[in-house]
Amino acid sequence: MSEKNYIKLIVFDMAGTTVNENNVVYKSLQQAINKLGHDFSLNNVLLIGGGKEKLQAIRDIMKPVYSSAEDLEKDAQIAFADFLTILKAAYKNLEVNTYKGTCELFSYLRQHGIKVALNTGYNEQTALSLLEKLGWKEGETFDALITADDVKNSRPAPDMIYVAMEKCGISNAKQVAKIGDSVVDIEEGKSAGCGLTLGVTTGAQTSEQLNTADPDFIIDSLVELKEIIALETV
């Protein structure tokens, strides 16, 4: 990799990648959808909805059982409103942790001139509630936060990564790495033309599922990023 293409920004997904919240978002999605009389499993919700903006995730999960687009949209809106209520209640007493080594990794990257951005299919309110629980602050723990509220087109469209690049002063997508725990994270990175795309097995989807998106690397811990970034910049 030539000097001009050294990785200068890593865009991290939040839940399942940097933040361990025990899949409470997808459990809340499942509960809200199944209140309408469906019987979707958590595995199905994770497979289809993982990483997506949450209203779109609901649409995609429910779509196979609807013959009418109008009925689908009506029920999706109902489920989404219920989801926000269920999630807010779940988050009140939720203990949220980072995956081992995440904060140390962020510090290491930033000390070595690599910007750290967080992006998520959550809305801003949900993302900020997670960050508050963790005590993470923009400009201190990480460099930029981009949520589904910041863009017209959420994953797998590249819009959130482009916003992250703009916020962090990066113009060359080849200098950007994207990592997440779902296929749609990897697809997002590829859509943006990122120099590296990585899947991590700590969250929504398995190594086999992540591999279907053909990432450059699949890792089991964010700590492995140190070695990968070092290799990419030699």
Image (cartoon, helix red, strand yellow):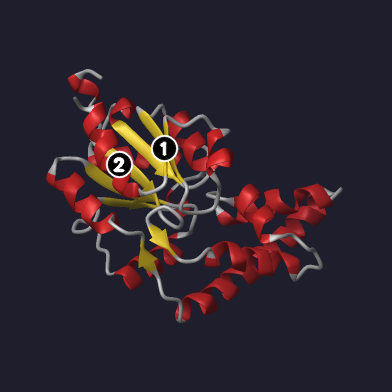
Q: Is residue 131 left or right of residue 143?
A: right
**Residue 58 can be seen in this image:** no
CA separation, marks 2 and 1?
9 Å
| Disc 2 target residue | 225
Give the percent coordinates (x, y) of residue 205: 55, 48
The three-letter amino acid code for the residue at tag 1 is Leu
Q: What element carries label 1?
A: strand
At a point 25% along the width and 19% down the height, the residue shown is 1
Give the percent coordinates (x, y) of residue 103: 25, 58
Give the percent coordinates (x, y) of residue 30: 67, 64
Give the percent coordinates (x, y) of residue 135: 27, 69
Q: How crowded is mark 2: few (under 14 residues within 10 Å), some or many (20 or more)?
A: some
At a point 68% along the width and 68% down the height, the residue shown is 32
Q: What element carries label 2?
A: helix
Q: Is residue 222 left or right of residue 80?
A: left
| Disc 1 target residue | 198
The three-letter amino acid code for the residue at tag 2 is Leu
